[in-house]
């Protein structure tokens, strides 16, 4: 209380001590906080100016937020800071294992500061209320004078403290958002080489003739036109032609029909989305090395995967437990800048700017996500087995996981033209990483037996859902596999049996007569 | 020759008369030309400066072109200016009929200026050659001195004239590109009301129950989700769900299979293209009211129709006559800003930012384009008749034609929810409007009997192909028709018979049990 008074007194004289005395009152690590403030808030007004006109500052808050919007986060992840603080050793090890550059110390310090500041704000509010209460009675005019003055001071202090709190929370968000998801205990620790083979199916086909790669087959069979697309659009774009168009449609139709049998709801999605949705799903829509195409003059961008509009479909909502799991299979086109991509694996259809994909997405209760992760990888394995591919499933090592994934299974299939395995799908359990950003919760049907917290009206408290995503069919990479693996000595390509009914019974892609 | 000398003499003294004397020599309408120059060439260097350092200017030409490139057209249409001049009355009437703001007078004046300047440049070149030839012989030193001086002057004049010629050609391009295509003699002259009904099929279905519009049906049957898309992407985006996804795929698959039977080659296309291709197809990729989404930080944009990548696929090439006609049916997603669109017809799926479409495109000999225009409209009519739609085909009136179209047939189908007809397809014969911009020519197989021009090596001269485009299936508008026309009293929707085999035999979209 006395410390508090000191602060207030210092606030009025409007000297540089205003700020430093406030820092003294709360146990801020000055240098860190100041450093972070100045790094993020470029258009920041000097604190002294704000202290000058406290009531004006109140009015100004929305305007200030707008003008500083480039620095402020547009949305907030519901990060469980308390859990992070209570499990900091595990989080620290996880950050290290995943080769993340997240700064846990900064997060924890900012969090402590934020808590202290919050307490301080609450205490001030209470004090202001007390002053207001006192003023309701009969008072000496000098006493009333004093209380008016005290109330005014309290209000001014509160305004600046609340502003600081907003900034501190923004800063905490900014720093904490780079903390990756935790990792499933079974995930191998290490780099790509440490990834564990979960399953291997088939063996590489033996060719008794010189094989062609898919680019050559695509040219000879008049299936793929990269040259025209390079003129019309740029490199790494392509036209599909003739049977390749039917093959794409067959792959998608067959995949959809197979996955729908497992209870997945088919969707098509918007391919232009707000950048914030991209961020909330854990992708970076901006920056020099972004994979994301942005639309000129808007805050929208093109999706790199249907995972993004799938994640967004239930954004900011509370689902009924009885509605879970929600299982989707979505068809979309995907667009990627492929900035920084280079090397042999960028040849032909393997790495392109635009492609068709069927993507699975599951929203479920936390206790069910491991089950659905296995369901998803099983569906993928079944699909690729039906198509006769030779592939292996990998439990990806910690350093190879994106920030959202708790665990990720990749499938790599044999590509004879490259003479190696190439990734054709990926199945990730993101647990609550995305749902905490997208604001997707559910309300348990039954009151929880343990846990003291209850929502209003005696409803059980909401919980964050878990989200999972998995590639069902990334068309160009499937084409690489199918064309290269099913080529015949005469230059034709056999269509796998399951796809034939979906392409009018075509069994063979034959060289065209010219 | 004497006039010519006068000009050269005037060029050397480097006074303001340099330019005006040149204007005098060639019958330029000074004010006009100067006005146009100054309007377009903001960065243009004063002519006197260029005259000062003629040789430096020669070196500078590429650099100059680069710096002025924002004002310069990036590509040139092979516009037949001679034909326009020789048919100016017809062109003028056509411009008026089509409600175009093209300025024919300016085009013709610029063209005359350009022709004159070109002649002048050629004459100067010849003269310079003559001087060079004279200097090869034995000469008095004073005579040689005089010739050196003359050659130098000639060279300097030539350099600035050639630069002027480049600018004049750019200007001519800029102004002439807004001249619309000529119009088929049968096209009705006038506004939209003047469009002639070519054919009418079916009649509006009589409903003996309260009908729903497609939005209501889409909601009740859990087929379309605009609300989530508004959050994730913005208004006028949507998710398709459940049977609607299958219906989209069925529509596209069925359409492709039907159109392929007519000898059309299926394609998928890039959906990101260079802006220049959009322009060459006759669309405006920039400006406040553009329909085109641009990609941030590149010269690329999203296609509004597959017509654009289809037009681009044979850009800048000479086709064999035996390869014609080239008939394509392409599937793509289309993206439109719909800037400025408003009114009742913007409801639901009728006008959206992103949709799937199958588009036909024909490249043929000029003498065949009318035939293929009728083939295209016939295919459309057959498709929509098979689906049981009530529609009419319109021969669109002159004021309703876009600049590229020589003639355009629209099909409007009955949409019970709107209680009116709505456009579901469009078939345009663009004759050589697009091919002159895209540079698509063919070389006739047989030498022409008439016509004196022959290409080198006795090959017949190349000619511009004709291009035609026509909607085979714009999915959302088809959905409007199918949902609204085929709804039943119990809220279900009957799937037209031809589509059933393409959606796993589904005959009816029933309300879901919840």
Image (cartoon, coloured by chain):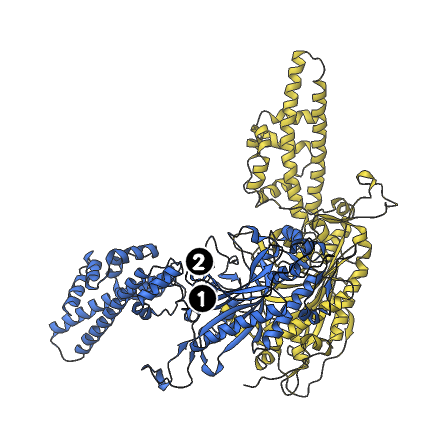
Chain colours: A yellow, B blue
Disc 1, SS: loop
What percent of the width, then of the height, locates residue B217?
68, 55
- The crowding category of the residue bearing disc 2, from other C-alpha atoms within 10 Å (few below 14, some 14 to 19, many at least 20), is some
Identify the subunit bearing mark 2: B
Disc 2, SS: loop
Q: Which residue is at a point 63% across and 51% down the rendered structure image?
A: B230
Q: Quadrant of residue A288?
A: bottom right
Q: Quadrant of residue B25?
A: bottom left
Disc tally is: 2
The answer to whether mark 2 and mark 1 are in CB contact below 8 A is no
Q: Is residue B5 visible?
A: yes
- Which image quarter is the C terminus of chain B in? bottom right
What percent of the width, then of the height, locates residue B215?
65, 54
- Establish if B63 lies above or below B369: above
What percent of the width, then of the height, locates residue A437?
69, 50
Q: Which residue is at a point 52% across and 74% down the rendered structure image?
A: B375
Q: Nearer the viewer, residue B34 or A166?
A: B34
What percent of the width, then of the height, locates residue A268?
66, 61
- Establish if A77 lies above or below A149: below
- Establish if B488 lies above or below A492: above
- Establish if A178 lies above or below B389: above
Mark on residue B191?
A: 2
Q: Is residue A15 visible?
A: no
Identify the subunit bearing mark 1: B
Q: Which residue is at a point 64% across and 50% down the rendered structure image?
A: B231
- Is residue B485 rendered to the left or right of residue B308? right
- Which image quarter is the N terminus of chain B in? bottom left
The residue that mark 1 highlights is B405
């Amino acid at each position: 209380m006395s410390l508090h008074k000191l602060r207030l007194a210092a606030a009025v004289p409007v000297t540089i001590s205003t700020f430093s005395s406030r820092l003294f009152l709360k146990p801020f690590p000055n240098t860190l906080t100041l450093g972070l403030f100045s790094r993020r808030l470029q258009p920041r007004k000097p604190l002294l100016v704000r202290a000058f006109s406290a009531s004006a500052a109140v009015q100004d808050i929305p305007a200030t937020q707008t003008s500083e919007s480039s620095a402020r986060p547009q949305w907030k992840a519901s990060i469980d800071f308390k859990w992070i603080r209570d499990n900091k050793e595990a989080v620290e090890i996880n950050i290290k294992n995943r080769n993340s550059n997240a700064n846990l110390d900064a997060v924890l310090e900012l969090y402590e500061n934020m808590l202290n500041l919050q307490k301080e704000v609450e205490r001030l509010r209470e004090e202001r209320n007390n002053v207001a209460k006192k003023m309701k009675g009969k008072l000496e005019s000098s006493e009333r004078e004093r209380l008016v003055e005290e109330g005014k001071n309290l209000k001014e202090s509160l305004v600046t403290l609340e502003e600081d709190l907003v900034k501190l929370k923004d800063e905490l968000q900014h720093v904490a958002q780079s903390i990756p998801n935790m990792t499933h205990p079974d995930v191998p620790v290490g780099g790509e080489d440490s990834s564990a083979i979960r399953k291997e199916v088939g063996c590489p086909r033996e060719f008794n003739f010189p094989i062609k790669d898919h680019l050559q087959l695509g040219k000879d069979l008049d299936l793929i036109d990269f040259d025209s697309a390079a003129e019309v659009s740029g490199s790494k774009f392509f036209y599909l032609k003739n049977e390749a168009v039917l093959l794409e449609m067959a792959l998608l139709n067959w995949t959809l029909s197979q996955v729908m049998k497992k209870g997945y709801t088919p969707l098509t999605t918007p391919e232009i989305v707000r950048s914030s949705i991209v961020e909330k799903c854990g992708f970076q829509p901006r920056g020099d090395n972004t994979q994301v195409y942005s639309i000129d003059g808007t805050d929208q961008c093109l999706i790199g995967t249907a995972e993004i509009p799938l994640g967004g479909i239930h954004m900011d909502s509370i689902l009924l437990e009885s509605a879970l799991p929600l299982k989707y299979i979505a068809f979309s086109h995907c667009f990627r800048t492929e900035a920084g991509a280079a090397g042999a694996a960028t040849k032909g259809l393997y790495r392109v700017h635009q492609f068709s994909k069927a993507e699975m997405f599951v929203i479920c209760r936390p206790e069910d996500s491991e089950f659905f992760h296995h369901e998803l990888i099983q569906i993928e394995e079944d699909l690729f087995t039906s198509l006769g591919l030779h592939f292996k499933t990998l439990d990806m090592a910690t350093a190879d996981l994106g920030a959202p994934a708790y665990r990720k299974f990749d499938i790599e299939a044999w590509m004879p033209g490259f003479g190696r395995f190439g990734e054709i799908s990926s199945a990730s359990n993101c647990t609550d990483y995305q749902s905490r950003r997208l604001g997707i919760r559910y309300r348990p049907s039954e009151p929880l037996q343990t846990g003291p917290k209850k929502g209003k009206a005696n409803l059980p408290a909401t919980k964050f859902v878990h989200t999972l995503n998995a590639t069902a069919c990334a068309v160009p990479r499937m084409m690489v596999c199918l064309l290269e693996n099913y080529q015949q000595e005469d230059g034709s390509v056999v269509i796998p049996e399951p796809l034939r009914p979906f392409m009018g019974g075509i069994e063979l892609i034959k060289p065209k007569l010219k």
